[in-house]
Amino acid sequence: MSVLLAVDGGQGATRMRLVVDGAAVHEWRVAPGRPGDQPDAVLVAMSEDVATALQQGGLPAPMVLSAGMTGFHGAVTGADRVLASYGALGVVRVVLATDAVTSLLGAVGVVPGAVVAAGTGTIVLASDGKGRCERVDGWGSTLGDDGSGYAVARAGLRAAFRSLDGRSGSEALRAAAERRYGSLNLLPARVAGASDAVPLVAQFAEDVAQLALEADPTAADIWDRAGEDLADSVAAAAVRVFGGISAARGSAISWAGALFRAGDLLVQPFQRGLARHGLPPAQPPVADGLAGAVALARSGVPELFPALAQSAATIPDPAPRSTNRSTMRSSS
């Protein structure tokens, strides 16, 4: 019996899927780690809750833990620490990767391509499917994450505060911000003192989307800018991996993340931005990042993403084998 615990860890929540002999038997959601926590520390902190869930299921060992986690801003590390924490649960192999890797694996599989993962934050990953890959953005809300849910919400709140000051802006966004947060005069201090300031701000993206659907021009422009920013990041990643736009034209491009639930508000300007760069249109994702975490556990797959994925095991990993898009899709 093969048992796999797949993890998709984002800024908004962490999802887990238990897979036994290739079939999903249970899925659950847990709260994300505290802001600033290292991704491996988030997994270690979750081990007691995971132990309870596994004991209730009465599942046997050995198990593989495969996780795509947000928050890696350099080389992925910590697989050995996670293995030590989960060893008592019967985990014999751990594979860690940045969530961009699992988003890519879920969206397009192991083929030349790129994915933009946009939720509270944003990261783009392009890969040639043979071991060369490049990431763009993912630098966090203060220094980057262009086109993210946080960026959309922040732009909407700035327009609300400009309206409050009488500096044009958007009266509709000001009213929406007051409905969500109360007095705008108190909001800056509330955000400054909040341990969850990023998700607190990012939730306003929902209001910006609603007003854009109601034809508020400022809100619509914010979503247009987000789509263009995401396309710019995809183009930059594609050039770095393939050496130029023309060489990237046969690659698969897709998206992942909760921000794309906005539908055409984001997809249409994203597609226009890709066309402006001479890139092919993006296709809807085949599967999500949790399915990508399942795919990540396959032998040979982590090695395709140098520095972005890391493995640790108490038993030797099996010899790498070739992986193609069709087999990746069948596992999702």
Image: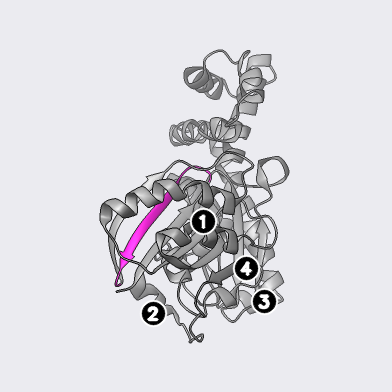
Counting residues from the start of the chain, the first of labels 3 and 1 encountered is 1
Q: What type is the residue that disc 1 sits on?
A: Ser
Check disc 3: other Cα within 10 Å, few if <14, some if 14-19, many if 20+: many
**Mark 2 or mark 3: which comes first in sequence?**
3
Q: Is mark 4 on a helix, strand or loop?
A: loop
The kind of residue tagged 2 is Thr
Nearest to N terminus: mark 3 or mark 4: 3
Q: Is the magenta stretch mostly helix, strand or loop?
A: strand
Please state the total of marks drawn on the protein image: 4
Q: Comparing marks 2 and 3, which lies closer to the viewer? A: 2
The image's mark for residue 85 is 1
Residue 19 is a magenta residue: yes
Comes first in the chain, label 1 or label 2:
1
C-alpha separation, residue under disc 4 versus residue under disc 2: 30 Å
Residue at 33% over, 50% down: 53
Identify the residue position indicated by label 2 in the image: 327
In the rendered image, which residue does mark 3 sit on? 242
Which amino acid, mark 3? Phe
Q: What whole-number distance in Å separates the C-alpha atoms at marks 1 and 4?
A: 47 Å
Tell which circle, 1 or 4, labels the residue nearer the N-terminal end. Answer: 1
* Residue at the image position 62 percent from the left and 24 percent from the top: 191
**Which one is in front in this view, the residue at disc 3 or the one at disc 1?**
1
Task: Using residue 279 as the reference point, say whether residue 321 is left or right of it.
Answer: left
Q: What stretch is highlighted in magenta?
A: 11-21
Front residue (pair 8, 61): 61
Q: How far apart are marks 2 and 3 (CA)?
A: 24 Å
Q: Position of residue 105 (x, y in %)?
A: 48, 68
Give the vertical position of 137 relative to 35 (above or below): below
Disc 3 on helix, strand or loop? helix
Front position among marks 4 and 2: 2
